[in-house]
Image: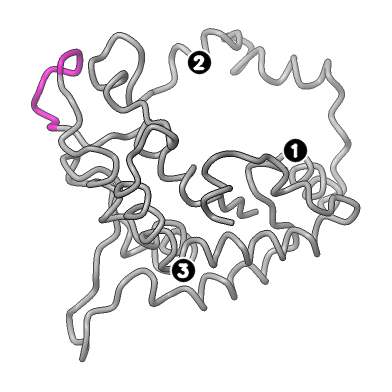
Amino acid sequence: MPLPGEPVSHLISVYQMWPPVRPYESERNRLPTLDFAAWARGTAGVQVAALGAQNLLRMTPMVRGMHTTRSCAGQARCIEACDHLSEAIKMLSLFDVVGTPDCMQSALLAAGAKLRLRRESSSDGWLRMSSVAGRLRPRELIRESPRAVHPGQAVYEASRVRWEQLNASARDEVLNVVGRCDLALYRSALERAEQTLPGRRGQCNQTRTPVRSSLA
């Protein structure tokens, strides 16, 4: 079940979770190798690639963070992630349920209904989250899960990005990147969500943010 995110917010989230860093530097003291706008230049089509061209999506080297690449071998011209937009949109049509992070709960309920799963009660959810083989409570699960950055590391504070604090030039650059294809994929996901989540019209794009005002 795909949940494509609003593309600028998605990039901000990725940058904050996996900022580009030098892996050999101390985790406590290292800083991002690129600021957000500079890093974003290499991310055109990251969500398209996730659906339609996974061989063009990269997480290494760490100094670049998550980025897209090109395929040039045996080609008359190099193929980029955005060249797979139509393939990614077609992929969305193959799923019975499509949503976005804004309507994840509705999408999960719709997927459960498609699979005829019993709807989980609040007590069921607590029991499920309270143990792994009956041993770990939720707080322990969170503490033992791997996290790319966390408070206490210099990179954590340095990678916090707020859209409204970026200058006009940086905003335009990021909007140009997502406008190449990921924005079109997101809009297709919203259309598909309208078809696959009956009774939830408009819910998947209801949160108004400074980013969405820029994308309008």
Q: How crowded is mark 3: few (under 14 residues within 10 Å), some or many (20 or more)?
A: many
Query: Which residue shows up at 15% across the image and 35% down it?
Result: 33
The circle on residue 5 is none
- Residue 176 is covered by the magenta coloring: no
| Mark 3: secondary structure | helix
x and y, in percent, of residue 146 in the image: 38, 23
In the rendered image, the quadrant that contains the C terminus is bottom right
Q: Which of marks 2 and 1 is nearer the N terminus?
A: 1
Type of amino acid under label 1: Gln
- Main secondary structure found in the magenta portion: loop
Q: Residues within 10 Å of mark 1 (few under 14, many from 20)?
A: few
State how far apart marks 1 and 3 are (Cα). Answer: 25 Å
x and y, in percent, of residue 147 in the image: 38, 23
Work out whether 98 lies above or below 65. Answer: below
- Residue, disc 2: 142
Query: Which residue shows up at 55% across the image and 8% down it?
Result: 139
Q: Which of marks 1 and 3 is nearer the N terminus?
A: 3
For residue 32, which quarter of the picture? Answer: top left
- Residue 23 is covered by the magenta coloring: yes
Residue that sits furthest to the left in the current view: 24
Q: Tell me whether circle 2 and circle 1 mark residues in contact (CB < 8 Å).
A: no
In this rendering, the count of numbered labels is 3
- Residue, disc 3: 52
- Residue, disc 1: 105
Q: Tell me whether circle 1 and circle 3 mark residues in contact (CB < 8 Å).
A: no
State how far apart marks 3 and 2 are (Cα). Answer: 31 Å
Q: What stretch is highlighted in magenta?
A: 22-29
